Image (tube, rainbow, N blue to C red):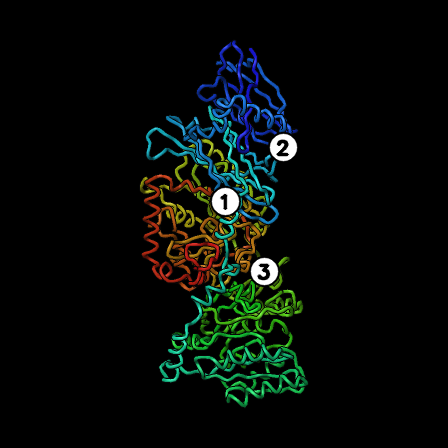
Amino acid sequence: MQLRLSDTIRGVGKIFLHLVADVGEDVARVRASSFVGTNELPVRVIPAPAGVDGWVLVLPLTQATQRLVVRAYDLTGQLLCELHETIAHDWAKRRSQMNTILRNQTACAMRNCDERLPLSELTECRVTNLIDRGKTEVIRLELTLRAYERASDLAGDVWVIAQDKEGVPLAVAPQICLGDTVLPEQEVPATFFRRITLSLEIRTGASFVRLWVRFDVEARDDLVVTLDESQLKQLREDWFYLTLSADRDPIYDQWYRERHRAKAWQLEGQRRAFAAGRLGVSPLFSVVVPLYDTPLDYLRQMVESVLAQTYGRLELILVIGSPDNGELVQLAERYARRDERVHVVALDANRGIVGNTNAGVERAKGDFVGFLDHDDVIEPDLLMCYVEGLATHPQTDLFYCDEDKLVDGRYEQVYLKPDWSPDLLRSLNYVCHLLCVRTSLVRELGGLRERFEGAQDYDLTLQAGERARNVYHARRVLYHWRASAESTAHDASAKSYARAAGLHALQEHLDRVGIAAKAVEDADVPNLYHLRFDIMSASSATGGHSLAQPPLVSIVIPNKDSVTLLAACIDSIFERSSYTNFEIVVVENESSSHETFDYYHELQAAHDNVRVVTYLPDTSSFNFAAIMNYGIAQARGEYVLMLNNDTRVITSEWIEFLLGHARQDDVGCVGAKLLYPDDTIQHAGVIVHRGGPNHTGIYLPRDSQNYFHSAQVCRNFLGVTGACLMVRKATFDRVGGLDEAFAADYNDVDFCLRVYKAGYWNVYEPQCELYHLESVSRGKNETRERALRFRHEKGILADRWPRYHEFADPFMHPCMWAINPYWHLDV
């Protein structure tokens, strides 16, 4: 027998070829391939429509010439014959035009006949995300395969080819499987589904992407998904707006003016309350502003913003460091004559920012002194917000508020800050404006220190934060930082000397508080710092001497029949860890495979610091919290490191980074940056809100600088994930371990919240990185039973901790969209 091509018709982005077999043996199956050069393109073979014999081959339309190979097979799979043809673009165009005229009925039947076929209900492909990574993009897709009666029918490899219109590969790296789960279908008995989540990294900026899904699965045809320019644009926009943090939101200026800043009637109410003496407290605020060749318009705006405060008990101290600037001196003195609250300190020469500011502090008579830059402006209710905080928390010694940038009359780059976060302060000066400190404390500290010129406010904040009885954060944008070419508001590297001063200030702070660590600046981001811990030096609590050996860390790993995962996890610990004084406690939980127990035997024989302990449950119900409590009870170390068996170590000093924090007397739980295998973030700290706990930064690129480097800075959170969590064993025991009411979910979050309530800081450390192989599709809650358990445990958490669910996580601003993990403005 022979195969031949009859009619040719073009459709939208496709070529339809009519394939006919001459009379001969029965053909059971036809397979076809098309090549442009060495690049293979997908070809779909479908039965010809009614009225047309044979088959229709559906090829992608390309500008290049294609080489077509068609093969016919009999019922036994034996090759009957094959056809080789060359399909040129112009040839296909002419043939299509001719067939449309001469054989219109056949042409109409063939054109787009594939679109009239029902989509296979047994195979589905859904693109979930197109993640921007700068030079590349990551396509996330979810495949669902269904089978009847036997789950084994779903077994086999699946791979995806990403290519452009001409078949040129777009992928820059092999595909990565993020999840592969086979489960019974709940709604249909004796039906199974397999859900596969794949990640493909492609060159950025493609205007067309063809995803050719190929299956090494029995009786499963290839699947082709095309993303045209409009679809790709939509996916990119979806990702942009999903991950749009508050500081980049173009609607912020409008949101601030219309929804956030105080209304006229509110300001009037504040003025009346002040005049009537109904505030409960009446501190005097001294606002110190050093002036040096200040532009007169900026000076006017700054002064007017201070004098317009609804809380009027203040003094504005203008320190002139440029006495030769006659216009500046005259304007400042004019304000002093107009308002008795304005005082001018005229210096004989410029003493630098520190000397000029200290001259103002010396003249301050207020209970609190605030530090305002000469070209910035504040909102009229700033001091009133501070007074309200003082009335509620009378022991407050340090105030700060939220801020934004003033750029050509527009408000931009808002920084909605967390409440007091000492570990974030050690990463960057997030407090910044408007710093206001109790005057007695400023003088006790000796004012600003000249050797920290350029970072004098950071040094003062670090010192004051060490001694403050309470720090109050006014959760309002009350300070506008004017961006100019010379200011750090415009460019963090504009004052290079400030970077060195900031690093010096941080190192002295570490030395003062007894944290044995060296401060280093981030290699890429100015004024962002990291700590390198000296584990062989004791903490301040033990006198600061050298240790004979570092403390023992017990790594507790639960496991059930997951030999491949467990072996990869433990191998990575031994191969990559620079810290050696650890033990591994594997908590065996009802494994049934002989392979598992053989591995346990080999593991303990090879390593004298590995133990396998067996958990024997009281009931048949799974309870992760009980498993971990049992394993940690067997731990011998002073510090416990909970670790999932589906993790792999990346950072060689991972234990040192976690332990460096955990050794501090006021630190409870310490967590790591966890990554999916495609180098996107799985965990960068846990926030708690009305939608429930959520991992911040999920799916963002590993090195993302989104929202003031939130995933790259050490900071405090209410919680960190138990997939990698270190805590002092005494602290674990003190709060009662994991609550076994949370059998599967949220036991780690509840534990962290109890640790926080007990007075400890929970810390996220981004320098500690591990891969976490947890499936993006999270197969664990696919069944009805598991879904109900998840909902029940989520309800327990909300009932137990209503404050954080209904009001605000102190480390997530209330003006942010609560259910978004990307610091999104609540618009």
**Element class at badge 1:** strand
Instruction: Please state which of the two labelled residues, at mark 1 or mark 2, is closer to the viewer.
Output: 2
Q: Relative to residue 64, is residue 158 drawn left or right? A: left
- Crowd around label 2: few <14 · some 14–19 · many ≥20 (10 Å): few
Question: Can you give x and y, in whole percent of width and height, for residue 611 in the image?
Answer: 48, 43
For the residues labelled 1 and 3, the Cα–Cα distance comes to 32 Å
**Element class at badge 3:** strand
Residue type beneath disc 3: His
Q: Relative to residue 593, is residue 446 drawn left or right? A: right
Please identify the quarter of the rendering in which residue 547 is found.
bottom right
Q: Could you tell which of marks 2 and 3 lies nearer the N-terminus?
A: 2
On residue 91, the disc is none
Please identify the quarter of the rendering in which residue 780 is found.
top left
Q: Could you tell which of marks 1 and 3 lies nearer the N-terminus?
A: 1
Residue type beneath disc 2: Gln
Quarter of the figure that contains the N terminus: top right
Question: Can you give x and y, in whole percent of width and height, for residue 414 in the image?
Answer: 51, 64
Question: Can you give x and y, in whole percent of width and height, for residue 47 in the image?
Answer: 47, 21
Residue tagged by mark 3? 530
Q: Nearer the viewer, residue 143 or 546?
A: 143
User: Which residue corresponds to the image point at 35% horizontal and 46% vertical from the top-left?
Assistant: 790
**How many dots with numbers?**
3
Question: Can you give x and y, in whole percent of width and height, for residue 785 in the image?
Answer: 32, 41
User: Which residue corresponds to the image point at 43% horizontal and 80% vertical from the top-left?
Assistant: 311
- Crowd around label 3: few <14 · some 14–19 · many ≥20 (10 Å): many
For the residues labelled 2 and 3, the Cα–Cα distance comes to 53 Å
Residue tagged by mark 2? 63
Q: Could you tell which of marks 1 and 2 lies nearer the N-terminus?
A: 2
